[in-house]
Amino acid sequence: MSAAVQQAAQTAPSPRERARRRARRSVTLGIGLTLVGIVVLVAALSFVWLPFAQSDTSGGRLQPPNGTHWLGTDIFGHDLTTKLMIGARIALGVGVGAVVIGAVVGITIGMLAAFATRWLDDTISAALDIIIAFPVLLLAMLIVAAQGASLGTAILAIGLAMSAVVARLTRVLSKRVLSQQYVTAARTSGTSWGGVVARHVLPNIWPTLSVNLALQFGVAVLAEASLSYLGLGAPPPNASWGRLLQEAQGTVAVAPVGAIAPGVALVVLVVGVNLIADGLRDVADPTRRRSR
Amino acid sequence: MILDVQNLGVTARDGSPLVSDVSFRLEPGERLSLIGESGSGKSLTSFAITGLLPDGLTATGSVELANVQVVGAKERALVPLRGRTASTVFQEPLTALDPLMRLGAQVAEPLRRHLGLRGAALRDAVHAALEEVRLPDPERIARAYPHEISGGQRQRVAIAAALACRPQLLIADEPTTALDVTVQAQILDLIQRLQREFETAVIMITHDLGVVAELADQVLVMYAGKPVEVADSRTIYYGPHHPYTKGLIESIPSASSIGHQLRPITGQPPSLINLPRGCSFHPRCPYVMPQCRSDIPPLEPIGAAEHLSACFLPETALGFSEESERLRGAAAGVPLAGASAGAADAETTNSPSATGRASA
């Protein structure tokens, strides 16, 4: 163990301060934040500036990358850079939206199960296990098929499908916290169950839960790309990366950039998010850090 | 009267009794000790008093806490009492504090909820509570997290939180078991000082009879979920009637017993689901009589009015005198004096383990 760590132990900083120090040292977290940061910047930029208008087809079909069209044009003559930038917006929106829905629904159900009587808990847990046995994509397809394809439906479907995983994790983590003596102590000092959840359970499950939610973000982005690829995602003119891939599929031999560019964009975002999740785990759990 | 417990019982989901027939009363400033081995129902009794029994357990009988009936009461009626009228301090000061919450916030919790303090008034009250338990530099402690302070300091913080609202009753569930001996004494002194200062009634749950000697007026000895002897602490020490109490006292190591063999109570406490017939203690009792195997001895006054014991031995067989020992021996039909019978017992139980060790 390094001298810096020993010194840190002596001065006994708060857990939060120590987490901050570890965060500064975590290379994984740094790379992840950089990759996701690039996508976020591009998405933000797309609101104020685009190289071409979305409907502009003046460039001609299937142009290779050149000075005016940096990534060339698609089969309709749209500028690919423009479509890719708008795609970043959609990818991030889907990720955030799905994670928020998944977290709210999942944490609520999981907490309910943790507090429920044995019979109800068993029922909820069995239902969750069955739902989790289906791939997120399949569940999302079912919901989209019932609701009709739109960006909102896609987000809702992915979020709901993800909520089962979040619920199961929340249930297990909460049960562990609820069995702790500080919960009993809080109860004997007159804290209501609501107070116990807000002040003790949520703060104590959050470090683990947040890592899982970061991972789910990546899953959501991929799920939306897959839905769009299958034509079940955001309908045109929304330029989802998944739909760009699908549109470029037929012309991949003549214009490979059309397929490569959205593919690379997806990889950058998903890998970035996963690296952040890994980094967060290292920060949240000091025992996982290897000594250097 | 702050607490009136009458025929309190705790039953499991299947109806088997885990605690039964517990009765006692506490006036402000009085100190009661519940003693007994692990699993004798001490902690369940304390949980029943604040209406916080674990899921699936139900209380029977009557518990009146500050004139509120706790048994069968609605949760909403009890929340205002917990931490305000009755507070609890637990055994493990590390696990009784939330690792992710600043200590100040944890002490502030009951003050905020019960007394409605906010802002600067709340901060001052927290610092005052921490000063009360003789913690150095309350401002620093209030900002610290549980892992940053020592075990003794954590228990002080837990006591500060428990006493912050000046409860009329403090339930201390083995508050010193997890601490060093020197720190134990400090914590006991602290509880005693605060108890005198605020006229708090204290229920001390412990298996450490040294704690009882220092910190109890009344003692209630429990065995297998039932009270077996009730008396003031002096009587428990010098004139116990029930063989279980006597065994507990005899198994305390002391300076004067150096060189002598300790006399443990042989065997294990019975399973509460499958209690022996008659007196629950009879399989382990050195003075067992035929009657003990069939009838359950009632908890009845013996000699002094305040001394209750659930044992068929003659009323005059009190304490450790040779005369008492002779009386017990005669009643139980033990041919020699009880002391040598006990020693023989100890030898027979020790020898198998000794040979086991030699062969291993």
Image (tube, helix red, strand yellow):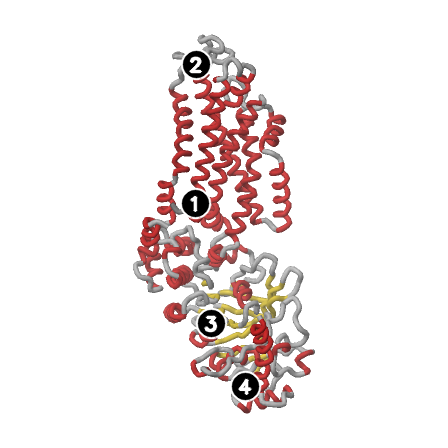
Q: Which mark is residue B27?
A: 3
Of badges 2 and 4, nearer the viewer stands 2
The answer to whether mark 3 and mark 2 are in CB contact below 8 A is: no
Q: Nearer the viewer, mark 4 or mark 3?
A: 4
Please state the chain letter of the residue tagged with numbered disc 1 in the rendered image.
Answer: A
**Image spot of residue B284 (x, y percent):** 61, 77
Nearer to us: label 1 or label 2: 2
Residue annotated with mark 2: A65
Q: Are marks 2 and 4 in contact (CB under 8 Å)?
A: no
Is the Cβ of the residue at disc 4 closer than 8 Å to that at disc 3?
no
Q: Label 3 lies in what chain?
A: B
Q: Amino acid at mark 1?
A: Ala
Residue drawn at the location 39% of the way across and 71% of the way down: B185
Q: Which residue occupies the extreme front position in the image?
A: B359
Q: What is the x, y in percent for residue B19?
A: 59, 68
For marks 4 and 3, give the CA distance: 28 Å
Q: Is residue B169 visible?
A: no
Task: Give the residue at x 60% y 69%.
Answer: B20
Q: Which chain letter matches label 4?
A: B
> First in sequence: mark 4 or mark 3?
3
For image coordinates 42% across by 46% down, the residue present is A290
Is residue B250 positioned above or below B27 on the image?
A: below
Q: What residue is shown with label 4?
A: B318
Q: What residue is disc 1 on? A: A284
- At label 3, the amino acid type is Glu
Labels 3 and 2 within one chain: no
Indicate the amino acid at tag 2.
Answer: Pro
Q: Residue at x 45, y 82 (%)?
A: B258
